[in-house]
Image: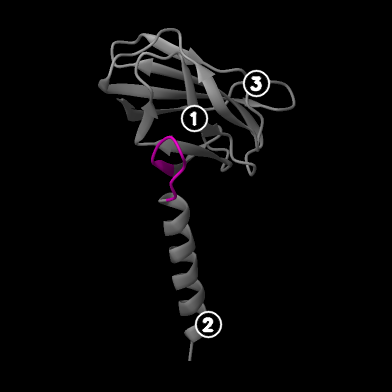
Amino acid sequence: MNRKPNILAAFLVLALTLLLTSCDAGGDRVERFAEANPGSGTNVAIPGYEKLSFRAGKTEQSVNLKNPAENTCTFVLTLTLEDGETLWTGKALSPGEAFTRITLTKAVDAGDYPATLHYECYTIEDNKPLNGAEIQLTLEVN
């Protein structure tokens, strides 16, 4: 009987499902993976968010935008509205670090806004650019 491989496979599927559907404060988070460089076989964990919740009329916002500890690269994050207007750009974020408070370039009125969270990834050793990602999300402003 080959029950051990089936149990292991079921456990791995369950663990991956839980990882991919975990939630964080400030938005619904879904873990995604991008290849660091084409053909390298090395992946970068990219936290994706379906929405971020902001306070209307305020530039100071609470968030939980992180670079997963298992990554071996830094992130530079930029939040833009659908029309391309930049609301925020962060400093380089090392693996295991997170932004918990950000200051927007302007206060946003109440409403839902299509936005993009841009990930620029860089090597830790020499700051060379790697592949990045763009996560489409909704800014939920109340």
Of labels 1 and 3, the one closer to you: 1
- What span is colored magenta in the figure? 22-30
Q: Quadrant of the C terminus?
A: top left
Residue to which mark 1 is pinned? 63
Identify which residue, 121 or 138, lies in the foreground. Answer: 138
- The x and y percentages for residue 83 are 29, 11
26 in magenta: yes
Residue kind at label 3, given as amino acid type: Lys
How busy is the neighbourhood of tag 1: few (under 14 within 10 Å), some, or many (20 plus)? some
Residue kind at label 2, given as amino acid type: Lys
The label number, if any, that marks residue 128 in the structure image: 3
Identify which residue, 19 or 131, lies in the foreground. Answer: 19
Question: Is disc 3 placed on a helix, strand or loop?
Answer: loop
For marks 3 and 2, give the CA distance.
43 Å
Type of secondary structure dominating the magenta stretch: loop
Residue to which mark 2 is pinned? 4
Say how the picture is coloured.
one colour
